[in-house]
Image (cartoon, helix red, strand yellow):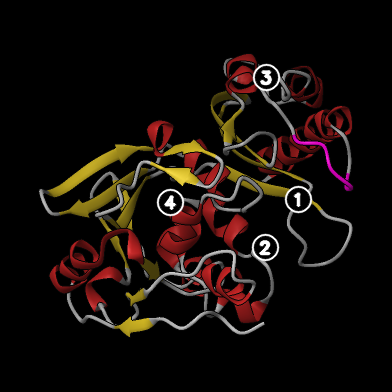
Amino acid sequence: MIPAPFDYVAPTTLDEALAALTEHGDEAKIIAGGQSLLPVLRMRLNAPEWVIDLGRIDTLKGIGDDGDAIRIGAMTRHADVAADPLVAEHAALLAEATATVADEQVRHRGTFGGALAHADPAGDLGAPALALGAEFLIAGPGGERRVPADDFFTGLFETAIGEDEILTAVRIPKHTGWGAHYEKFVRVAHQWPIVAVGASVAVEDGTVVGAAVGLTNMGSTPLRARGVEQALVGQPATADAVRAAAERASEGTDPPADLNGDADYRAHLATVLTRRALLAAIEG
């Protein structure tokens, strides 16, 4: 299908983009890489009168060292996140997860911030960002505010970003030296994950001293498997300890039921994938 007609503006500064968003209000939609919005427009599930393209705002792009964190601009492409040495060194889980997003064409067009703002619970980036304790930088008419990951995802396809606000960057606390793995289960290549698990683990002298585990498509938002983390930290980095901790993977989840599997099937998958992800992260 062809999208409904709309007017288009491509500001070159954040201030211009915020002004356009304020002017047009709920008649406008922001487009980043367009990998989520364009299919919606083509199916006419949404018909905005204005589309505000952030692609020309260079200050929203790039990855940099930000002290105890790395800072990723919202308009940074998936391919750049997956290949960046800072991300690989300090947020290996994010690098692994980003490398699995859709296919190569999408990764070279889609953006890091666009995917997170879309907040699809089956998207690959929300759970790793949540597990790593990300901080979201959001700009609006009143200036910039920072929202922790625990408060960012508020519901199905909903976030803490206001109607007159724009996500500008994400800070990822450094997890230097942590092993990481993203385990994703799909029936068809490049499909949305039926369930996926991101795990990052720190081990010292054979003992787990830190664990971060995120669950994809196990509820209406990305989830953090805190029960698994609590069960694993302080334990020996062994297969038996991992197996016991992974049994808590589905605690507090509300997995969907659809043609790919019912809730019980997904709960079982979460346990299996958590075990695999943790073992792979520990093994490095």
Mark 1 secondary-structure assignment: strand
Return the residue at label 3.
236
| Neighbour tally class for label 2: few under 14, some 14-19, many 20 plus, Cα within 10 Å | some
- The mark nearer the N terminus, 1 or 3, is 1
Residue 191 lies left or right of residue 22; in this view the side is right
Name the residue rendered at 86%, 29% in the picture. 268
Q: Give how far apart the Cα atoms at labels 3 and 4 are.
A: 23 Å
The vertical placement of 80 against 237, above or below, is below
Label 4, on which residue? 90
In space, the residues marked 1 and 3 are separated at their CA atoms by: 25 Å
Check contact, mark 1 vs mark 2: CB within 8 A.
Answer: yes
User: Which residues are the magenta region?
Assistant: 256-260
Asked whether 26 or 209 is in front, the reply is 26
Above or below for 215 versus 110: above
Q: What residue sits right under mark 2 in the picture?
A: 100
| Residue where numbered disc 1 is placed | 184
For label 3, the SS is loop
